[in-house]
């Protein structure tokens, strides 16, 4: 019965193409997931302040005083600083790290009522800069 042998050929070819198609779609899907995943990874490292912050060796004068001035001194300065805690010079900031839990306060989640600054927290790279500065011995 060679009569119908050829009938199957288009069917065989089209099912082959169909399988190829599935492969192409799944390769595309895997690629898409990989890309999606790498975006997710980037967002995470921004949130937790690792690789996307500029690699700086922060000193008090070069970086930290600027951050404290703009993010903290609004409340922690003047005649009646918040919590009696002034943060307007190197010695005060170093003392607040040692005795007032400064690094603890700035790392709290935004939902925590004790987070500093209270109105939204530091951005990831400011936080990173302060923590690295403390870790490297708070250079002036
Ligand atoms: C909007 C005003 C405001 C800003 C801005 C602010 N703070 Fe505060 N801070 C307060 C108040 C009010 C308290 C006391 C209430 C409390 O303990 O949460 C306080 C308490 C603290 C304490 C605890 C002091 C203690 O002796 O218990 C630390 C440390 C602190 N702040 C650090 C910071 C730092 C660092 C920044 C900047 C990153 C900052 N704050 C920004 C208002 C502010």
Image: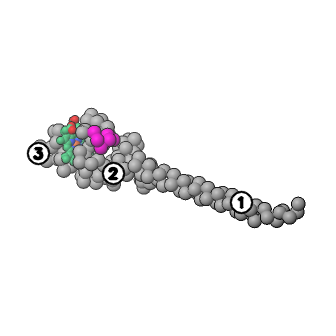
Give the residues in magenta. Answer: 106-112
Residue 76 position in % (x across, y down): 19, 45
Q: Earlier in the sequence, mark 3 or mark 2?
A: 3
Looking at the figure, which quarter contains the N terminus? bottom right
- Residue 115 colored magenta? no
Quadrant of res 138:
top left
**137 horizontally vs 96: left or right:** right
Q: Which of the pair 15/82 is nearer the observer?
A: 15
- The residue pinned by badge 1 equals 15
Q: Residues within 10 Å of mark 1 (few under 14, many from 20)?
A: few
| Residue 98: % across, % down | 30, 35
Disc nearer the start of the sequence (1/2)? 1
- Ligand 1 located in image quadrant: top left
Q: Which residue is mark 3?
A: 79
Label 1 close to label 2 by CB (< 8 Å): no
Q: Is residue 12 above or below residue 115?
A: below
Q: Residue at x 73, y 60 (%)?
A: 16
Residue 123 badge:
2
Q: Residue at x 71, y 63 (%)?
A: 14
């Amino acid at each position: 019965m060679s009569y119908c042998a050829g009938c199957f050929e288009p069917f065989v070819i089209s099912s082959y193409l169909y399988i190829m198609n599935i492969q192409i779609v799944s390769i595309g899907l895997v690629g898409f997931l990989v890309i999606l995943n790498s975006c997710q990874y980037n967002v995470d490292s921004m949130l937790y302040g690792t690789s996307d912050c500029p690699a700086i060796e922060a000193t008090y004068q070069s970086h930290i005083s600027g951050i404290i001035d703009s993010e903290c001194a609004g409340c922690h300065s003047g005649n009646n600083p918040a919590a009696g805690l002034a943060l307007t010079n190197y010695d005060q900031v170093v003392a607040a790290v040692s005795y007032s839990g400064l690094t603890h306060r700035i790392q709290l989640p935004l939902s925590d009522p004790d987070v500093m600054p209270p109105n939204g927290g530091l951005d990831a790279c400011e936080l990173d800069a302060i923590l690295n500065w403390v870790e490297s011995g708070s250079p002036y």
